[in-house]
Image (tube, grey):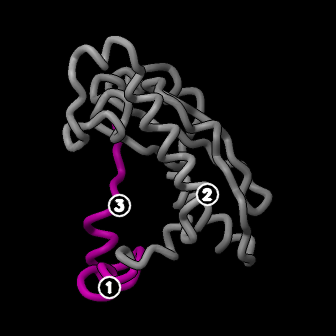
Amino acid sequence: MEAALRSAKDFVEGKDLENIEYEQVRGLAGIREATVEIGGESYNIAVINGASNVFSFMNSDKMKEKQYHFIEVMACPGGCVNGGGQPHVNASDRLTIDIRSVRASVLYNQDKNLLKKRKSHENGALNKMYKTYMGEPGHGKAHELLHFKYTK
């Protein structure tokens, strides 16, 4: 989500902005919310991790209280840093180390300190996918496969 928000801010505000952090949506809580400012407008965003939290969020009063402009959903509890594709950690280490927090911290530090391309529109693999398969972002196949509208 952070890379997409950085790209949106660049495009809307018409300049290459550096060092934008969206710490409000970081962490391991099952549901995180924030309001971010882009181009003088406020946008409500949420990050949900763990499938059971999707149902909690959708059925809560939150959806009645405000309109959300961007919701990121990750199926694994703790998000992708705790998913099945991660290296196995033995049981004794899991008892003494909060693996999710350590993994999340490493990813945030890599994002901030190691990555030169921190925005979605600068991602080479993503750009190649659009060029060879999806076509123009937000149109045709890309829109059909990547944009969803949910209603109750």
Total numbered labels placed on residues in the image = 3
Q: CA distance from mark 2 to mark 1?
A: 32 Å
Badge 3 marks a residue whose secondary structure is loop
Whether residue 142 is in magenta: the answer is yes
Q: Residues within 10 Å of mark 3 (few under 14, many from 20)?
A: few
Where in the figure is residue 120, as x and y percent of width and height?
49, 68
Q: Foreground: 97 or 119?
A: 97
Q: Which residues are magenta?
A: 127-152
Mark 2 = which residue?
A: 113
Magenta stretch contains residue 46: no
Question: At 52% from the left edge and 61% from the top edge, which residue is drawn?
Answer: 4
The residue nearer to you, when weighing 106 against 17, is: 106
| Residue on which the image places disc 1 | 135
The answer to whether marks 2 and 1 mark residues whose Cβ atoms lie closer than 8 Å is no
Q: Earlier in the sequence, mark 1 or mark 3?
A: 1
Tell me which corner region of the image, top left, top right, bottom left or bottom right, holds residue 125.
bottom left
Q: Which residue is mark 3?
A: 147
Residue 52 against residue 147 in the figure, above or below: above
Residue drawn at the location 30% of the way across and 79% of the way down: 129
In 3D space, how far apart are the residues under numbered discs 2 and 3 (Cα atoms)? 31 Å
Give the quadrant of the C terminus: top left
Secondary structure beneath label 1: loop
| SS category of the residue bearing label 2 | helix
Camera-nearest residue between 68 and 1: 1
Mark 1, other Cα within 10 Å: few <14 / some 14–19 / many ≥20: some
Horizontal relation, residue 82 to residue 15: left or right: left
Which tag, 2 or 3, sits closer to the chain's start?
Answer: 2
Q: Position of residue 85 (x, y in %)?
A: 21, 44
Check disc 2 and give the amino acid type.
Asn
